[in-house]
Amino acid sequence: MNTTVVTQRTGSRLHLSDTALIASLVDRLYDKMLDDYRINRFFFTRPVADQTAALKCYINALLADPRPSEAEISDLLDEYFTVAFARTNAKPSLVTGRDFSFLLDIVGGRDIRTINLMCLGHSHLMKLLPEDEHYDIVMTHLAESLQELGVNAQTAASILEFAETGRDGLMGRGPELMLAA
């Protein structure tokens, strides 16, 4: 499928005119992520259709022109993080060994890392301790998905560049979030 997509840059934002491409891209990317043992542990076992629907809604709103308010964007992002990463079982797992990693912060075994959440639901993902290598894996899957969908090189590069801008925020290194109580 050779897809022609109109893209334009307004400031640092990318506008895609093809919502069908976004839907196909999210579906294909999700299939790759869930099949990859290196990152599939991050995702909750909710139906994939629910997870992809929430992500498609967020991406379409993020790329819309005019763009919805920051509060609406934050609510959509919170919905996605909750659907994709929130666990309903609060019991710690002794299998991963990461459940007590906070003890290293207390006893001085490593530097304390300040985490800045993108929204409240982002905490669900951050509890799973994602690292830059995980983001690199997703970026590789995104590039492969764009190629498989026949997206032209210029548009693919713009999409990859846009996706890379989310790295620091997703890793909890973004600006501090101040939410009203």
Image (cartoon, rainbow, N blue to C red):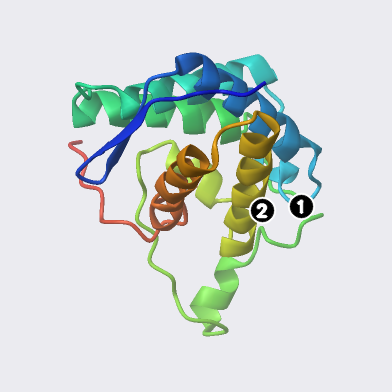
- Please tell me the numbered disc located at residue 38: 1
User: What is the distance, in whole Å, between disc 2 and disc 1 at their CAs?
Assistant: 8 Å
Q: List x then y, in percent, for residue 141.
A: 67, 44
- Dot 2 falls on a residue whose secondary structure is helix
Question: Quick one: label 1, few (<14), some, or many (20+) residues within 10 Å?
Answer: few
Q: Amino acid at mark 2?
A: Ile
Q: Residue at x 75, y 49 (%)?
A: 93
Instruction: Tell me the kind of residue under disc 1.
Output: Arg
Q: Is residue 115 visible?
A: yes
* 36 in relation to 70, above or below: below
Left of 2 or right of it: where is 67?
A: left
In the image, residue 34 sits, relative to residue 6, either above or below, namely below
Q: Is residue 168 left or right of residue 100?
A: left
Residues at discs 2 and 1 in contact (Cβ within 8 Å): yes
Q: Residue furthest bottom?
A: 108
For label 1, the SS is: loop
| Residue in the image at 37% along x and 24% along y | 76
Residue bearing the label numbered 2 = 137
Whole-percent x, y for residue 8 in the image: 30, 34
Asked if one can make out residue 90 in the rendered structure from this viewpoint, the answer is: no
Q: Nearer the viewer, residue 145 or 58?
A: 145
In the image shown, does 87 or 8 lie closer to the viewer? Answer: 8
For discs 2 and 1, the disc positioned in front in the rendered view:
2
x then y, percent, for residue 73: 29, 28
Query: 161 or 37: nearer the eye?
Result: 161
